[in-house]
Amino acid sequence: MIEFVYGAKGSGKTKKMIDMANGELANAKGSVLFINDRDKYRATVDTHIRFINTDEFHIEGTDELYGFVCGVIAGNYDVECVYIDNLLRILRADGPESVKGFLDKLNELQKNMKIKFVLSISAEENTVPEFLKNYRNPA
């Protein structure tokens, strides 16, 4: 399953993502990952969740992020859920339409690996492309 959390900047997307990830632990049998591009949220993510700051790995662009996610999953046989916060900023993308290629790859990965992905992007509802609205979970 792939789910998107989107809304305007400052609308509470990161807080919602952290709450969702922390809540995921109650029923998780495997690992939960939280990927962000800043350390400032590390303290609010439960310590049982693997927090990864993409800036520490100099990740930029769709291929690098996808390869990184695959590598983390390959190194952890029990990954159950992956939260990726601030996707557009991590990808250094111009807008939500830029995530289509990444989403296509991620969709295949989640089908094969049975991993839940929850991603957030900063975008007003009226600017979200139709292909993303199927994954809707506004902030």
Image (spheres, rainbow, N blue to C red):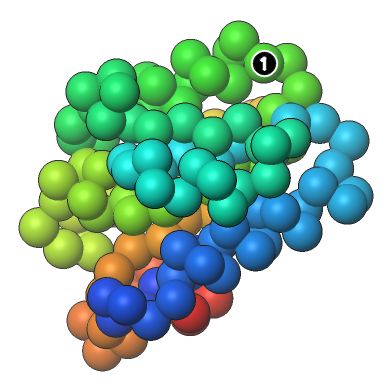
Q: Residue at x 53, y 19 (%)?
A: 72
Where residue 68 appears, as percent x and y from the top left, is 39, 21
Q: Residue at x 21, y 23 (%)?
A: 58
Would you identify the image quadrant in which residue 127 lies? bottom left
The local crowd at label 1, few if under 14, some if 14 to 19, many if 20 or more residues have their Cα within 10 Å, is few
Question: Which kind of residue does numbered mark 1 sit on?
Answer: Asn
25 in relation to 113, above or below? below
Q: How many marks?
A: 1
Where residue 7 appears, as percent x and y from the top left, is 36, 79
Q: Residue at x 48, y 15 (%)?
A: 71
Q: Is residue 110 visible?
A: no
Q: Secondary structure at mark 1?
A: loop
121 in relation to 9, above or below? above
Residue picked out by circle 1: 76
Depth check: 99 or 68 in front? Answer: 68
Q: Residue at x 29, y 69 (%)?
A: 122
Q: Outermost residue, left direction?
A: 94
